[in-house]
Image (cartoon, rainbow, N blue to C red):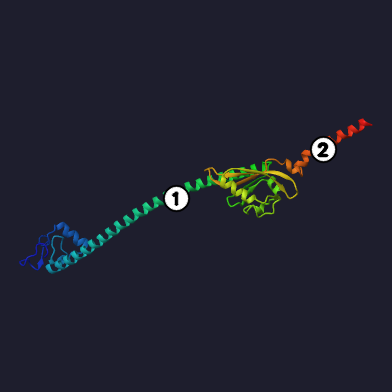
Amino acid sequence: MLPGTTSQLPTVFTSWKEISCYLGKSIRTLQRWERDYGLPVLRPNGKSLGVVSASRDELDNWWTSRWSHNQELQSANEEIQSGNEELQSTNEELQTSKEELESANEELHTVNDEMQRRNDMLTQLNNDLTNLLNSVSLPLVMVGPDLSVRRFTPQAAKALGLTSSDIGRPLSRPRLKVNVADLEQMMLDVMAEVRPKQGRVRISAGQWFDLRLTPYRTADNRIDGVVLSIPSLDYLETPDPVRSVTKPKAARAKKSKGKKKVGKG
């Protein structure tokens, strides 16, 4: 029921005051509604603003239509407001995700920098080790726990007949110049007993030398292979160490015998 509606009211209103009483709004508001929203008010014979007329049925229809329109606008406004809230929530989630991605990106940059630093360190250590092995004048061979060749010095390549293709292969696979029947078992014993072994071996050319086997110990005190080394290359220059020791004695004895013969004459 419209504001001010009663069964005694006329069907046509002839002044702003009557319309104002019927609709329950101020005259100023009604005039604004007429201007902005098409309030059905008639001005007979083009008279001034003060002379108006309006049908009660037309006012009721306009009011009902206006009220329905307002309800639709309000519903639409509520939907828009709800959509704005959802967009705001989505925006906050996106902002949170963006911050998380930025944080993860910073962590990745930090990890990448650390990995690059460690790679540089590993490269430097590898260069140092390579130069160290190349500078060592002794034959050295580093063997892994599976008895495969890891590294060796140029002197070891010369003395034992190793080549770069032997890296990663078991030490028993290459045709070494060394004649050691139980070399593989000796290396296994060194790792198992965690103590060095040393012995004299002969290469294929008949030369003798000392072979020393020591456990390969890591920084965290794990045994991870064996290091083969030849402490001295002196024997490589002499086919038989016993002959090299006895030869000077035989020479001295022969010389002394010659002198005796000269004295007798």
Establish if 249 lies above or below 99.
above
Mark found first going from the N terminus, 1 or 2: 1
Which one is closest to the eye, mark 1 or mark 2?
A: 2
In the image, 63 versus 166, the foreground residue is: 166
Q: What residue is at 26 percent from the left and 61 percent from the top?
A: 79
Residue farthest along the top direction in this orientation: 263
Q: Position of residue 257 (x, y in %)?
A: 87, 34
Residue drawn 35% across the image and 54% down it? 93
- Spatial CA distance of label 1 from label 2 is 82 Å
Quadrant in the picture for the N terminus: bottom left
Q: Residue type at mark 1?
A: Asn
Residue at 67% from the left image edge and 44% from the top image edge = 199
Is the residue 47 above or below the residue 127 in the image?
below
The answer to whether residue 47 is above or below residue 149 is: below
Q: Residues within 10 Å of mark 2 (few under 14, many from 20)?
A: few
Q: Is residue 16 left or right of residue 110?
A: left
Residue 144: image x %, image y %? 59, 50
Q: Quadrant of residue 135?
A: top right
In the image, what residue type sits under mark 2?
A: Ala
Which residue matches tag 2?
Answer: 250
Does residue 65 appear left or right of residue 180 in this picture?
left
Q: Nearer the viewer, residue 109 or 170?
A: 170
Mark 1 touches mark 2? (CB < 8 Å): no
| Residue 237 horizontal/vertical position (percent) | 76, 42
- Is residue 71 in view? yes
Instruction: Identify the mark at residue 105; answer none if there is no mark.
Output: 1
Label 2 element class: helix
Nearer to the camera, 200 or 171: 200
